Amino acid sequence: MKKLTLAAAMTLWAGLAAADPVTGIWQTEPDDNGNFGHVQVSPCGETICGVLIRAFDSSGKETPSDRIGQRILWDMVPLSAGSYGEGKIYAPDRDQTYRSKMALDGNALTVEGCVFVVCRGTVWRRVQ
């Protein structure tokens, strides 16, 4: 009976993690060069991560990129409804990794990268 209860609890937890409202495909804001991308956000174990799946140039034309498949977000921990933190974000335009936090509001995801107490934020829009 204990094994059955544990298995049911683990299945429920896995279902909740998979149903996290932040999962999906998000379009980043244009970077310093005008380029933007689509990031697939999904559960990665007990945290949330995101991988670049498409890249676009400043005119909006899809473009090849050696960054496709690279993780952009990782180790994001759900803190409360719509709030995530304790993660990292990679900024391809600056080739830098920052401490990160996110806030979900409907189809808008505010993503911030921080160095010490200074944070730079951007808003991603849900594509799917």
Image (tube, rainbow, N blue to C red):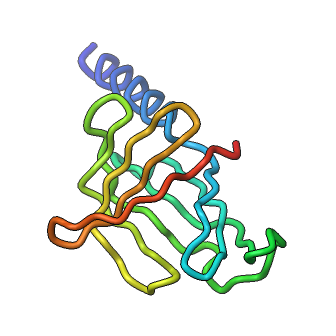
119 over 109 or under it: above or below: below
Q: Residue at x 42, y 55 (%)?
A: 111
Name the spot of residue 64 as percent of width and height, x first: 77, 82
What residue is at 65 percent from the left and 86 percent from the top? 66
> For residue 83, which quarter of the picture?
top left
Residue at image position (50%, 40%) is 22
Q: Quarter-wise, where is residue 94 in the image? A: bottom left
How many numbered marks appear? 0
Drawn side of residue 59 relative to residue 126, left or right: right
From the viewer's side, name the closer residue of 83 and 14.
Answer: 83
Give the side of residue 99 with respect to residue 23, left or right.
left
Q: Is residue 100 above or below residue 21?
A: below
Residue extending farthest right: 61
Nearest the camera: 84 or 43? 84
Indicate the quadrant containing the N terminus: top left, top right, bottom left or bottom right.
Answer: top left
User: Percent x, y for residue 14?
Assistant: 43, 33
Image location (x, y in percent) of residue 31: 56, 73
Q: Quarter-wise, where is residue 112 in the image?
A: bottom left
For the residue pair 17 and 60, the one nearer the viewer reads as 60
Q: Is residue 114 above or below residue 15?
A: below
> Residue furthest toward the left?
116
**Which residue is drawn at the image coordinates 74% and 72% (left, top)?**
56
Q: Quadrant of the C terminus?
A: top right
Q: Nearer the viewer, residue 57 or 17?
A: 57
104 is higher (above) or lower (below) than 8:
below
Residue 5 location, x and y as percent?
30, 17
